Image: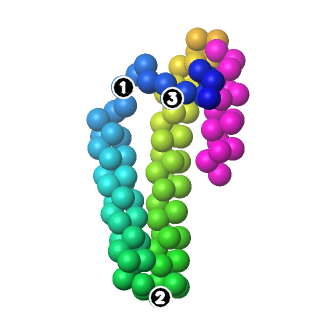
Amino acid sequence: MTEKDCCRFKETARDAALQKSLQNRLNRIMGQLKGIQTMVEENRYCGDILIQVAAAEKALQSFGYLVLQDHMETCVADGIRRGDAEVLEEAIELVKKLK
């Protein structure tokens, strides 16, 4: 992994309300995953497990879109204002990875 691929710390702190909302969503997703784990341990019906997997995937994708929106509105916008052309390339790659 190169330095460019490594996670970075955000220069601007997230809004407290967004931070709380993201944490709450993440906690629900973790609860969904724990529920799926329990279903597998209990040898539950495959169809029921798959329905829960689909719900968890949708919740995780929604979470990712919220983080992406925040990233675009803050980090990317700030980078553009500073004249950082690479920030657009990075944003495009992030969108490709998220879909």
Residue that badge 2 annotates:
45
Residue at the image point whose x is 53% and y is 40% from the top? 68
Please tell me whether residue 88 belongs to the stretch shown in magenta.
yes
Crowd class of label 1 (few under 14; some 14 to 19; many from 20; radius 10 Å): few
Residue that badge 1 annotates:
13
Q: Earlier in the sequence, mark 3 or mark 1?
A: 3
Residue segment shown in magenta = 84-99
Give how far apart the Cα atoms at labels 3 and 2 are: 39 Å
Residue closer to the observer: 92 or 3: 3
The quadrant of the picture occupied by the N terminus is top right
Residue at the image point whose x is 43% and y is 19% from the top? 11
Q: Earlier in the sequence, mark 1 or mark 2?
A: 1
x, y percent for residue 24? 31, 52
Above or below 87: residue 58: below
Please tell me whether residue 18 belongs to the stretch shown in magenta.
no
What amino acid is labelled 2 in the image? Tyr
What amino acid is labelled 1 in the image? Ala
Name the residue furthest bottom. Answer: 45
Q: Earlier in the sequence, mark 3 or mark 2?
A: 3
What amino acid is labelled 3 in the image? Cys
Q: Identify the main secondary structure in magenta.
A: helix
Name the residue furthest top. Answer: 82
Give how far apart the Cα atoms at labels 1 and 2 are: 44 Å
Residue at the image point whose x is 53% and y is 55% from the top? 61
Label 1 SS: loop
